[in-house]
Amino acid sequence: METIKTAMFETLIESATPDGDGGFTFTLEGKTYKIKDTLEISKIAQDHGYIIIY
């Protein structure tokens, strides 16, 4: 049986922290990403198998 993972877009954005270089640091399932725009979070979460709830 496959597990369905969902995430609220607003909650994911809140977990991104400014990195001091004009971008953000975002961690999901123990993996850390350096991103330039918080909109990249949707793609990262989808790559982890999440269904994003807007």
Image: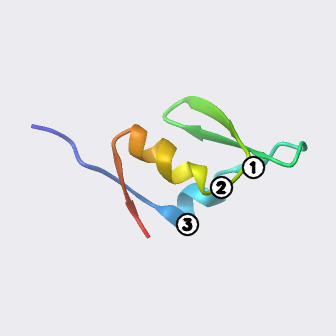
Quadrant of the rendering where the N terminus is positioned: top left
Instruction: Identify the amino acid type marked 2.
Output: Thr
Question: What label sits on residue 38 in the rendered view?
Answer: 2
User: In this orientation, which residue lies closer to the viewer: 47 or 8?
Assistant: 47
Mark 3, residues whose alpha carbon is within 10 Å: few (<14), some, or many (≥20)? few
- The residue that mark 3 highlights is 10
Residue beneath the point at 41% across and 39% down: 47
Q: How far, Cα to Cα, is label 3 from label 1? A: 13 Å
Q: Sequence order check: which comes first, mark 3 or mark 2?
A: 3
Q: Amino acid at mark 1?
A: Thr
Question: SS at mark 2?
Answer: loop
The percent coordinates of residue 13 (x first, y second) are 61, 58
State the quadrant of the C terminus: bottom left
Residue 47 or residue 5, whichever sits in front: 47
- Is disc 1 in contact with disc 2, using a CB cutoff of under 8 Å? no
Type of residue at label 3? Glu
Q: Is residue 13 above or below residue 28?
A: below
